[in-house]
Amino acid sequence: MLNSILIVEDDSKIAKIVKVYLENEGFRVAVAEKGRQAVDLAAKETPSLVILDLMLPDVTGEVVSQELREIGDFPIIMLTAKSSEEERVAGFSLGADDYIVKPFSPRELVARVKAVLKRSQKKEGTKKLSFNGGILTIDSRNYEIRKNGQHVMLTPTEFKILFVLANAVGRVFTRGELVEHALGYQFEGYERSIDAHIKNIRHKIEDDTRNPEFIHTVYGVGYKFTGNLDG
């Protein structure tokens, strides 16, 4: 089955160009010009990935992103004219898996789509990790996280970061190393995005984000995972 891509973009010229490039690479593509239309389309047929413009005519892309996250954990690439580092970090804080600034190269966008899909679909071996007496479990075969038996929804990038950390308990990873492992490539300014992703992960798996049980900050360096591996 072909990967289905949902483009959410009110500029018809940009949407048409991106659609043509993606279809030439074998993707099945749908286009929504408004945020509400995008949410309705995603609810009817869950896409493999969403390319989301943040500046839409009816509701903001940020609101659409939050509503899409309630539908599923498919990757979201944010496409926007908002170019400052703070705006990019804010995008990642909303759960974006990648962030592309206009104007952009359609070929680069296609490459980013492929990279994000690859890491979202890649299985990390067949490993199932359990920590602290089963309080937190990470099942890489099914891309599933559970906290106290309850399913925790992480974005593909968040899952990748958590798995990298948990698969090497006690090892300190720099932000740059986590970018390389989670994104598969390095771009200027992306290291700060790791902080936003870590913040999101902590809110989902930690009882007290101020005193985390699993992910600890090593100031001036990066992050490490400190849970006790079961068995």
Image (spheres, rainbow, N blue to C red):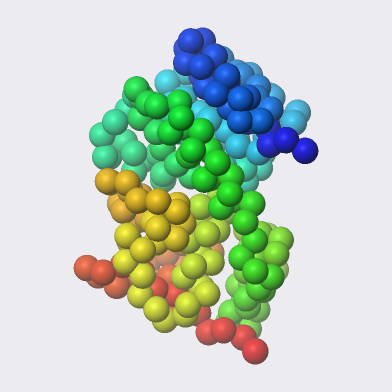
The answer to whether 102 appears left or right of 133 in the picture is left
Q: Within the image, what quadrant is residue 82 found in?
A: top left
Look at 32% across and 46% down and name the residue there: 187
**Which of the 4 image quadrants contains residue 24?**
top right
Residue shown at 67% from the left, 73% from the top: 128
Nearer to me, 207 or 198: 198
* As drawn, 40 above or below 170: above
Side of 92 where 134 appears, left or right: right
Q: Is residue 98 above or below residue 194?
A: above
Q: Is residue 8 visible?
A: no
Q: Is residue 130 visible?
A: yes
Task: Give percent across and percent down for residue 9.
Answer: 51, 19
Q: Give the residue furthest to the bottom.
A: 231
Q: Nearer the viewer, residue 108 or 55?
A: 108
Whether residue 202 is situated above or below residue 216 in the rendered picture: above
Quadrant position of the N terminus in the picture: top right
- Residue 163 spot, x, y in % from top left: 53, 66
- Residue sitting nearer the eye, 80 or 65: 80
Q: Position of residue 67 (x, y in %)?
A: 59, 34
Residue 189: x, y in percent?
28, 46
Number of marks present in the image shown: 0
Residue situated in front as seen by the camera: 109 or 170: 109
Please, is residue 28 above or below residue 85 in the view? above
Q: Residue at x 45, y 54 (%)?
A: 184
Question: In what quadrant of the picture does the C terminus appear?
Answer: bottom right
